[in-house]
Image (cartoon, helix red, strand yellow):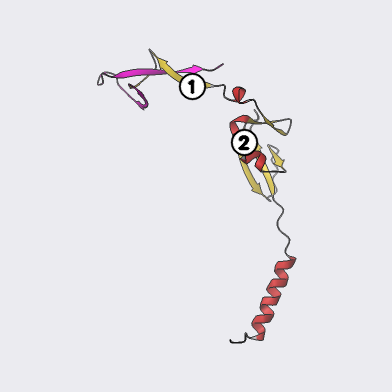
Amino acid sequence: MTDLDPEIIEALRMIEEIELKRVPPFVEHRLYYRKDGTISMFCSTNHPVTDDNYIVLSDPDMFYKSNTVNLRVMDRALVTLNPRIAQQGSAISKSTTGQPVVKNNAALALNSTSEYENIEHYDRKTNS
């Protein structure tokens, strides 16, 4: 076994000393939101920012373990909505008018109905 150069040993000792004194950076878990309270972004950072459209989460799992559709920021606090309320909006359903698609495959939208025989239509409907 070879002995290490004393200068290398001293350098390694100094590096270890510096590493032991290093303070981990302060990190905030920020949840940015829009004016209506919907979530726009989550990030972990220590960068100072002047925006006021975010809240600081003490536990990021509050964000990671929830469907963001069910989350809102109200009065600068994170709130979980009733899933039925959060899912209100619009959807598509079979119709006699609207977007023509290949029959039994709504994912294949058609531009023209004249070239195809097996078509059906889907149109937007509002859930309430």
Name the residue at 66% across, 49% down. Answer: 45
**Residues packed near mark 2 inside 10 Å, few (<14), some (14 to 19) or many (20 plus):** few
Name the residue at 72% across, 34% down. Answer: 77
- In the displayed structure, 59 sits above or below 3; it is above
Lateral position of residue 61 relative to residue 89, left or right: right
In which image quadrant can residue 94 be found?
Answer: top left
**Residue flagged by tag 1: what amino acid is it?**
Ala
Q: Position of residue 55 (x, y in %)?
A: 70, 39
Looking at the rendered image, the quarter that the C terminus falls into is top right
Mark 1 element type: strand
Name the residue at 73% across, 61% down. Answer: 23
Residue 85 vs residue 109, the one in the foreground: 85
**Residue flagged by tag 2: what amino acid is it?**
Ser
Q: Which badge, 1 or 2, comes first in the chain's sequence?
A: 2
Mark 2 element type: loop
In which image quadrant can residue 114 be found?
Answer: top left
Q: Which residues are magenta?
A: 103-128
Residue 121 highlighted magenta (yes or no): yes
In which image quadrant can residue 104 be found?
Answer: top left
Q: Position of residue 5 (x, y in %)?
A: 63, 86
Q: Which residue is mark 2?
A: 66
* Residue 101, label in figure: none
Q: Which residue is mark 1?
A: 91
- In the displayed structure, 59 sits above or below 39; it is below
Q: Position of residue 70 (x, y in %)?
A: 62, 30
Looking at the rendered image, the quarter that the N terminus falls into is bottom right
> Whole-Å distance between the Cαs marked 1 and 2?
22 Å
- Camera-near label (1 vs 2) is 2
Residue 77 highlighted magenta (yes or no): no
Q: Position of residue 121 (x, y in %)?
A: 37, 17
- In the displayed structure, 78 sits above or below 6; it is above
**Residues packed near mark 1 inside 10 Å, few (<14), some (14 to 19) or many (20 plus):** few
